[in-house]
Every structure is written in structure tokens, then in C-alpha cells.
Amino acid sequence: MLAKTHLLSRRTFLRGVGVTMALPWLESIPVWGDQEGSVPGSSEAPVRLAILFAGNGFHSKEWWAEPPAPGKQGQDMKLGKVLEPLADFRQKMLFIRGLFNAEALKGNIHSSQTGNLLSGAPLASGGEIRSGTSIDQLLAKHHARQTKVPSLVLGCEPSNPSVHKNYSMLYSSHISWGSPTTPTPLELYPAIAFDRLFKDAASRGDQSVLDAVLSDAKDFRQQISNSDQRKLDEYLESVREVEERIAQAGKKGEIQGWRPTLAKPNIPRPPDGIPQNIAEHMRLMCDILVLAFQTDTTRICTLKLNNDHSSLRFPHLGVDYMIHHLLSHSDTADWLKVNRFFMEQVAYLARRLNGIQEGSRTALDNSMILFCSSMLTGNHDATQLPVVLLGGAGGRIQGGRALDYRGRSDRQMCRLYLSMLDKAGLHLDRFGDATEPLPEA
């Protein structure tokens, strides 16, 4: 069978279950297409992006971080009470204050401040749906061919389809947008998210790449000249030899180059349904995110812990008398308790990723975890946005810092997104209302 693909290039390939093998140049049949250049391999782990969102902002007096004093290290950063659960990760943390999204200020309500949080795009009002493609989905499309799942979009609270003060509440329910008119489907069920990563996957395990394509190679061999048959045999034999050498090197612990630290899930499939306990739900989604990165099933994940204008309650914290949205309207001790609970989920994710060694770095070092909300406080203050970055993006982000852009004219949130896109390998001249990245980030 003559197997071709126009997704990767216009070359001819041999194929088997889960395997695509390019052919060498042959004189009797054209197997090389007109693609110029190729994507080089890398021995370093890829940069992953995880975006975590919590709605309704935070305690106005306890969301802060101070940079370390001159001569001190990142672990000497001082944190407000909301951020204290992240204290163990101060050296790998970048706190940014003062960034804002100009388009979000036009409606000054939850939906208008959330629907374009990750795009900076103008929003349609009147119950219509129009936003902009979000940063996570831009990266997902850019790297779509590199992983089984281009992106994973998870949530812990159902979408709200109503209209609030002339804006669709779908804006409050979705931060990830595949196109200006299409919010990315939100997966609430841990079991289904798990299945998307692993069910029906073409998993070869330790099967030889060559063995997987032998049937296709046999059919292809009949279409070429005797001279090319000898060339093909030599090529396949060289592949076999390399495979055997790699196998031996792996047994001796000599293999080089990056590989996922897991080839299959190391946790059981979650039970069907949505967990009744919100803490369990959030932890399961964090575990699935880690598993997705660890197996390299996807490199882009968005986790919406709750909606803006959220109706979640927190009986496990002893805070069951009021929903999240109403709690956000005043700086009570219970509101601080709920804030810290959300930060504990971020800390849990960071701890899990930091425990996975990938060469000289950890999975956290090779990731960017952006934690954000669409307003600083529950009184709809979006003149500055709460932003925390954890992880090193493969050595491209320096942690242990706190940046303050308050009072500056160049404080567009989309400038941060341009910086993050650059670090993930997508270089754009413009994104949203930004035309240049944040140099300090």
C-alpha cells in the first residue's frame, strides 16, 4: 500500500499501527514531496502550558507579594495570606501586579470581564456570542501534530447559558475559545477526561517500529525496481540495527534525549459521574492534568476551577451558608479561607509536577502554570488582574520575583501572553491589544 500524508508533508510513508516511517530517496518512484526543511528533534523536554482560573477575584488586603530584599533569594519573598499556600514554590514563582485587559472594562460585569480574559478581544453584547481565540487554543493549533490531544479543557462547575446585564453568561463560564464564536467544550467529568487521554489510543508499548510497518513495506516493495528493493532492504535493516542499539542503551541506562516519564496511566480511571465533593473534583482534575503532561498526551491544558459569578459552596471548609459569588463581595475570614482553598489546588498541582524529574529539571521547571482571575476583587475591580506564574518554561522564566506595572502605560495583559507564546515556540507580532511582549517576564 502506498501511504501518503498531507498533514505532516507531501512525502510518502510506510505506516503501521501507531507508526509512520518516512522512506529514503528512490529512483523508481517519487517518495519525497516538496516540503522544505523539517522540524528538528530535541533532547529537551517540551514546554507545557497550564492555565488555572478561579472566578470573582480575591481578598483585597491579602493578595500581594513583595520581592526579596537586595541580596536575598527567591525563597525570601513575602506573601499575603491568600498566596501563603505557594510558599514552597517562591523560587519558581513570578508574581505580576497591575496588568489589565482594556476591553474587559467596557461592560464592568462578570461576563464582560471573563469571556476575553485569555484573548483581550472585544466582546459582543446583547446576548450575542463573539470573543476571540484564546492563547491556549492558539498554541494548541500551532502544536496540534505533536501530541495525541491538542489541548485539554477541564472544568469543575457547569456552564451557565443565561444572560446577565446584557452579556451572555457563557462568557463567565468559558475562558478557552477555539474561535471568536466558539468556546472550547468544557469537560466536567474526570472519567471522560481520562478516557480522552487514553481510550482507544494506538499504544505500541515496546513493539518495534519496523515490525509495525513490515506489512506496508512488503506491499510497497512490489512497486519498485530491483535496485530500489535492495536500497529499501538496506534502509530497513539500518532501522532495525538502530532500534536494537537503542534498546541495549536503554537497558544500560545510557539512552539520551527526552522521553515522557510515563507510557501509560499510573492512576486508575476515575469513577463515572461528577464527584459530589468539590475538593475531590478539583484534585482529580489536577491529577489528570499531571498525567496528560507526564505521558505527553497533551502539552496544553486549561482548568477552570469555577465560573465567574460562581454558585459553588464549600461545606468541607465549614462555609456552606453562602455561594462563592456572594462571599466575594466582602473581605471576611470565610472569603479568605475559600481563597486559600483555591491556592491549595494550585500548590498541589505544582508539587505534583515538581516531583517529576526530567533530566536536570522537573516537569514544573519545564512548564508554565498561569493562575489568574478576571478581577482583582469581588467588587468587579478589573483595573488590575491577579496573576501568578509558576514554573520555568524550560529555563526561560526566572522565578523568585514580583513585578509591579501599576501606573505604567504598557501594562496590557496581552503583553504577558505574547511573552508566554514566545517561550512556547509561537512567535507573533500582535496578540489582542499588545504589539510587544513583556521583557521582564
Image (cartoon, grey):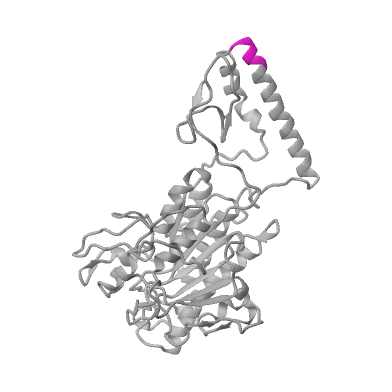
Q: Residue at (42%, 89%) from the top-left corner?
A: 332
Which residue is at the front of the view, 47 or 191?
A: 47
Residue 61 visible, this angle = yes
Which residue is at the front of the view, 384 or 419?
A: 419
Q: Is residue 203 above or below residue 386?
A: above
Residue 363: image quadrant is bottom right
Would residue 94 appear left or right of 331 to someone viewing this image? Answer: right
Would residue 110 appear left or right of 344 to someone viewing this image? Answer: left
Residue 271 visible, this angle = no
Q: Is residue 29 above or below residue 119?
A: above
Would residue 402 appear left or right of 363 to someone viewing this image? Answer: left
Residue 276: image quadrant is bottom left
- Relative image position of residue 420 (x, y in whole percent): 49, 61
Would residue 394 appear left or right of 166 to someone viewing this image? Answer: right
Secondary structure, magenta segment, majority class: helix
Q: Residue at (52%, 65%) from the top-left corner?
A: 369
Which residue is at the front of the view, 289 or 392?
A: 392
Magenta stretch containing residue 235, yes or no? no
Q: Is residue 248 above or below residue 56?
A: above
Which residue is at the front of the view, 88 or 26?
A: 26
- In the image, which residues are magenta? 225-230
- Relative image position of residue 365 (x, y in whole percent): 62, 63
Q: Residue at (25%, 59%) from the top-left corner?
A: 129
User: Which residue is most to the top?
Assistant: 226
- Relative image position of residue 310 (x, y in whole percent): 35, 73
